[in-house]
Structures are given as C-alpha cells and as structure tokens.
Image (tube, rainbow, N blue to C red):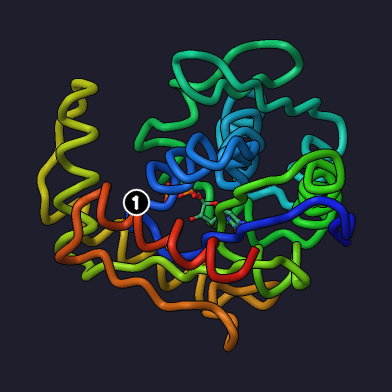
Amino acid sequence: MSNEKNIAITIDGPAGAGKSTVAKKVADRLHFTYIDTGAMYRAVAWKALQEKGACDDEAAIAQIAQKLDITLEQSPNGLRVLADGQDISEEIRTPAVSHVVSAVAKIGAVRERLVSLQRLLAQKACVVMDGRDIATHVLPNAAVKIFLTASVDERARRRYAELKQKGFSGSMEELKAQIAARDKADSEREISPLVKASEAILLDTTHLNIEEAVEAVINEAKAHI
Ligand code: CDP
C-alpha cells in the first residue's frame, strides 16, 4: 500500500495512449518521480527472450522475474531501465518485446513480484505511476486516478511514428492489429486486467495534443492534492 505521506497519481490505459509521455511530463512539472510499470514487464519479457528465445514456459519466466534485478533510473535523457545493471532502455521497446510482453504480464508470479516492487517505490517518493492496473490494484488509495485512452487508429498512428523514427519497418495495419491484440489480451486476462477504476477520470486524448493532455492531468491533480 502507498505510504500516506507520499502522494500518488496513477495513469492507466491501453497501449499507445500516450501514458508514458504524459506521465513523465506531469512528474517533471510536479517534481514527482515517474514510474513506468510497463517497462518492468518489458524487462522481464526481454530477459526471457534472451535466455529462452520464447515466452511460453510460464514456470521459467516466473523464475526469471524472481531473480532479475530491475532498476528505473531517472536521467537527463529520460527514464533508463536497468536489468541486472545492464541498460536495456532501447531493447525493451522493440516490436519483438511488444509482441510477447502481454503473455509475460499475465503470469501471476511475475505480477506479484513486480507489484511489490512498484508499491515499494511508491512508499519512497511521490510518484506518477503508469500502467494497466495501478488504480485498481497496485495503489488503490492513490490521490488522483486517470484513465488515458484514444481511438485505436490514433494510437496506432502515434506508435507508428515513434517506431519509424527509431528505424523500424512494418505497416500501419500490422501495427494496429498488434495493438488491438495486446489490448484484448490485457483486458481479458484473469489477474488484474486492464479496466478503468470506477473512480478514475476518463481522459480521451484522440483529439488532444500532449500539452493539452498534461494540462488536463495537472488540473485534475490540483483539484485533489
Ligand atoms: O507503452 P505501451 O502502451 O506499449 O505498453 P507498456 O505500458 O510499455 O506495457 C507493456 C505491457 O506490459 C502491456 O501491454 C501489459 O501487458 C503489461 N503491463 C501490465 O500488465 N501491467 C502494467 N501495470 C503495465 C504493463
């Protein structure tokens, strides 16, 4: 549970809704710590691909999650993700990792380990934490809860632009199908599925730019803290 002294803002929502960009900017503005929980699931998926070449052996992946030391380091270039000390910030964003991460995230033992890590981080500092189950499960007592979404077309368009800039190829249609498949897997899994907490504020960013979305979250935060 989050420490009463530390304030938490949660931002949940589907793939590519802009959570990490918005969460990072909100954290900077409020001098809070930004915690990207998706990066933690991605780190486990990356390690599983490294060690096993696949993500179908749940017991093996649970063990990997148990052993892996995951650190989120704030740096001038944004959040760096370290796995056993190795900077894997770029590696975890590849389409290969995106493709398998939902299968890793549905494993109970993986979630237990990462959720306890996430709660510890929220005890140590005021945080903006983004993910899928932060308001519903990780920090149910958070002061401010946002559910950030956008149409699947707009989310695919944003992710396509991001990946293209990094030099990845692939078609927009393919990417849209992958995003929709990940949304479905995340929403339909048994443990802590992606769902809007009833008390969370719904923020549809389909027609909002980043600054407008940041402003909306800050206004919401100011009203509650
Ligand atoms: O940035 P993007 O929206 O593509 O996804 P992400 O936030 O990096 O999360 C990657 C994956 O991790 C999600 O598709 C979920 O399967 C999983 N995840 C989760 O299950 N619970 C969280 N709190 C955060 C991410």
Measured as percent of width and height from the top left, residue 47 is found at 64, 28
**In percent of the image, x 60 and y 74: which residue is there?**
193
Q: Residue furthest bottom?
A: 198
The residue where tag 1 is placed is 18
Measured as percent of width and height from the top left, residue 95 is found at 35, 37
On-image quarter of the C terminus: bottom right
Q: Give the tally of numbered discs.
A: 1
Measured as percent of width and height from the top left, residue 116 is found at 86, 51
**In percent of the image, x 73 and y 55: which residue is there?**
7
Residue 50 vs residue 65: left or right?
left
In this view, the residue in front, 58 or 5, is 5
**In percent of the image, x 80 and y 51: which residue is there?**
6
Within the image, what quadrant is residue 152 found in? bottom left
**In percent of the image, x 68 and y 72: which residue is there?**
192
Circle 1 SS class: loop
On-image quarter of the N terminus: bottom right
Question: In the image, is residue 210 above or below residue 51?
Answer: below
Residue 118 vs residue 43: left or right?
right
Question: In the image, is residue 179 above or below residue 99?
Answer: below
**Badge 1 amino acid:** Gly
Measured as percent of width and height from the top left, residue 142 is found at 72, 66
